[in-house]
Image (cartoon, rainbow, N blue to C red):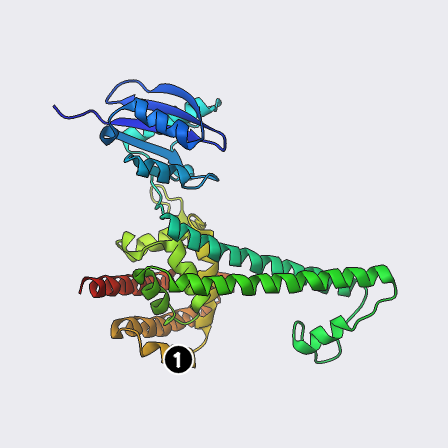
Amino acid sequence: MSKITRYVGMDVHAETIAVALVEGRQVVRSLGVIPNRAEAIQRLIGKLGDVNSLRVCYEAGPTGYVLYWQLAKLGVSCEVVAPSLVPSKPGERIKTDRRDAEKLARSYRSGDLTAVWVPNAEHEALRDLVRAREAAKKDELRAKHRLSKYLLRYGQRAPQGCRPWTLAWWRWVRALQLDHAAQNVVVLDHIMAVDYEAQRIERLEGAIDEAIKDAPPHMKAAIEALQALRGVAKITAITLTTEFGTFRRFERATQVMSYTGVVPSEHSSGARDRRGAITKTGNAHLRRVLIEAAWHYRHGPRLNLRQKQLQRTLSPRVTEIAWKAQERLHRRFWRLTNKSKPAGKVVTAVARELVGFIWAIGLQAENDAATAAAN
């Protein structure tokens, strides 16, 4: 007689975890609330018995993947599910932790949940580093805006022909003296904020360079190969690699496009076919770098010095895909532009096709790295 699989749903919060269990076709039952601590989780798993028959799930959230890693060490099969894809009844008006845990267990048993890809601790640490650099760039932009708008409020304009943020512009700003001492203090504070963010970015980029050296071979191969694409330099390549995790988890390019949320939404019924804006589901970090890279394809196909030097170390298949991307996406960009499509729609359409080339190159690089490791 085969063992009955027991499905466990967990509603995870910072301090507590609500637990529910269902076995076979039995009714879902609540197991109460436990503290969100490693020892409490270990005691719970010990009470539930054989770990080989357990299937645990919980929603992705601010607590990260610590619970997943803890359960994996205990030998428990666990999946982290996408909260936005958990089925819900329109008429439900009562929401509690107990009910959420029971709904997770019930939906998990019926196969209605969608699991997300979970990185290991090393991969998550590298992704945190890349995202910290992105946050620092946003903070630097805000600091620059505060400085420039403060000068604008008091009619302070740089000399003619002095472009903002150049060395000459900074010399003018640092030598600037306003009418009141309080104003000069504010200007100095804004300047120091911009300088601090610049130093922070430099520090994080240095840490990223060191982290790439210690990265697994398949990840280093993907980072190097992706830089063969136009508009993809080191920071963009490592962002793509860390956010995708591994390109081998996707079977088709269309899956990658859906994952990034750059496909159009659709609401069709009967003879009516209606498509709307892009879904924006999935990973916002990926969409940002994809849109930035897509703008480069408004220029004609060519190789810069960095790409020419890089191609000497890449496989012919990777360079072939990268050049094909340049030709196709450049034609696509101007074909849509000549049809008077809005620039935002044009670059989004180009970004959607760019994802397919990124997946093809990343997959090729990972397979080449795996072959080299096997030999």
Residue 98 in sight in this render: yes
212 with respect to 197 (left or right): left
- Choose top left, top right, bottom left or bottom right for residue 304: bottom left
Q: Residues within 10 Å of mark 1 (few under 14, many from 20)?
A: some
- Choose top left, top right, bottom left or bottom right for residue 60: top left
172 shown above or below 126: below
Closer to us: 295 or 156: 156
Q: Residue at x 39, y 77 (%)?
A: 307
Give the SS element for disc 1: loop
256 shown above or below 271: below
164 with respect to 133 (left or right): right
Q: Which residue reaches farthest left?
A: 1
Amino acid residing under circle 1: Leu
Closer to us: 259 or 245: 245
24 with respect to 34 (left or right): left
Looking at the picture, how far across and down is residue 84, in whole percent?
A: 42, 39
Looking at the picture, how far across and down is residue 53, in whole percent?
A: 23, 29
Closer to us: 280 or 138: 138
Q: Residue at x 29, y 63 (%)?
A: 360
176 with respect to 50 (left or right): right
**On-image quarter of the N terminus:** top left
Q: Residue at x 67, y 72 (%)?
A: 164
Which residue is under mark 1? 303
- Choose top left, top right, bottom left or bottom right for residue 348: bottom left
Residue 263 in sight in this render: no
Looking at the picture, how far across and down is residue 232, in whole percent?
A: 42, 68
Looking at the picture, how far across and down is residue 80, in whole percent?
A: 36, 39
